[in-house]
Image (tube, rainbow, N blue to C red):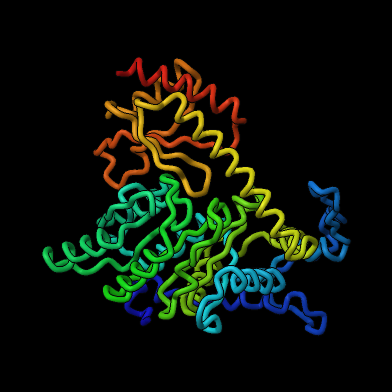
Amino acid sequence: MDWNLIFNESAKRRHLSPLREAASFIDRDDVLNMTGGVPNSSLFPFETASFTLSDGSCINFTPVEMKRALQYNMSLGLSDFLKLLTTLVIKYHNPPNMETRDLCVINGAQEGISKCFDLIVSEGDSVLVPKSVYTGVLSILEVYKLNYVTFEEDENGIIPQSLSNALYRWTKESNKPAPKVLYTIPNACNPTGTSTSGDRRKEIYKIAQEYNFVIIEDDAYFFLNFEEKFEPSFLSMDTDGRVLHVDSFSKIIAPGLRLGYVCAPRDVIYRINAFVQSTIQQVSTFTQMLMYKLLTTWNEKGFDNQIKRVRDFYKHQRDCTLISVEKWLNGLAEWNVPKGGMFVWIKILGIHDVDRLCKNALTDFNVGVLSGRIFMTNAAKNPGFIRISFATLTPQRIDEALEKLAIAIREEK
């Protein structure tokens, strides 16, 4: 994969900061370091820290560890934490040619996705996206005034033939340059809840090879898969170095920690790192150390137990929600069974102005749901969809909310 054909002009001009690179030996006692404006850690007002975990065990920061946790560190990420992340990537994805890839720690998946797009697209470019897209990504793309080349999805995710047809129409019939990038949430897609099957992912990767586009794989819901097995990621089949894999600890640990990573070809990570150096400089050393300590305290078994705990909780929430959806919305709406995640994507029958429905549900019944319009690449089209979350309310409260939503739908009709 020739990334020089993919990078935009600003990406090609990004280079590492010599000053930030000096942070690579900030922890070395054998270096008499007089390079950067590193504050003297003896002046930090925090001495120690202790965190009690849900199982009763504790994570403690000694005075020496606190000084390190509160100090500058490498822009790529804390070295120990990066090694641990690399181990996790190999365990769950085992990408081919791992020696040609690197990782960079980022402030949650959103920042990683943003920086990936910022390296690739320019104003007026085209991108491949489904007709309904995570609204956080739309807010990134709108800045560039991009052309959306859209394709169809069903309960099994992206339809490869629809993707292929869209590309043919765009490149052959309209004689336009092929899009440089496909954005996808392959597992438990937000907002639809669908997961693209493994066989379809293989077909999609072949299409990417044919048209030479990059895949931004937003895998923040990888571990929130409710099926018996994990489908192979695009990263796991990336023989060409065309996949930018983004993941996050927000859904499985805690979103306030703002921790995620990008795994991509080394040349891409070099430029993401340069981008980080010129913007946020680095992700918090403290939160990286906290996550590192948590994962090493748990070990592999403890992490697997946490994943099971999270999956079991949300699967139970989904199952209870679907019972209530069937109970109250049967005949009023249509929906697919989400294969993971936190959402049910619902098409309201006979009502196109779902914006007004959502407003009335909130003002008249104190029920908050999201209009599908905010997820659409063409916001002028009102498809009649809403998105509901089953993440935080109890099953009893979800049932109450859906009963009231049904009343609101009938009144709207």
Instruction: Left or right? Give the position of 380 relative to 389.
Output: left
What residue is at 72 percent from the left and 68 percent from the top? 38
216 or 27, which lies in front? 216
Residue 205 visible at all: yes
Residue 70 in sight in this render = no
Question: Looking at the rendering, which quadrant does residue 20 occupy?
Answer: bottom right
The x and y percentages for residue 340 are 51, 49
- Which image quadrant: the N terminus? bottom left
Quarter assignment of residue 179: bottom left
Q: Position of residue 3 (x, y in %)?
A: 38, 78
Say which quadrant the C terminus sits in.
top left
Question: Viewer-proximal residue, 235 or 227?
Answer: 227
Q: Taking 320 as reference, is 397 above or below it?
A: above
83 sits to left or right of 220: right
Q: Position of residue 356 (x, y in %)?
A: 34, 24
Q: Position of residue 243 (x, y in %)?
A: 43, 71
User: At 34% across and 50% down in the image, what residue appears?
Assistant: 154
Q: Is residue 226 above or below residue 317?
A: below
* Left or right of 214 on screen, residue 57: right
| Residue at the image position 70 percent from the left and 53 percent from the top | 306
Q: Is residue 94 left or right of residue 217?
A: right
Front position in the image: 319 or 210: 319
User: Residue at coordinates 66% horizontally, 53% vertically from top-left?
Assistant: 308
Q: How many marks?
A: 0
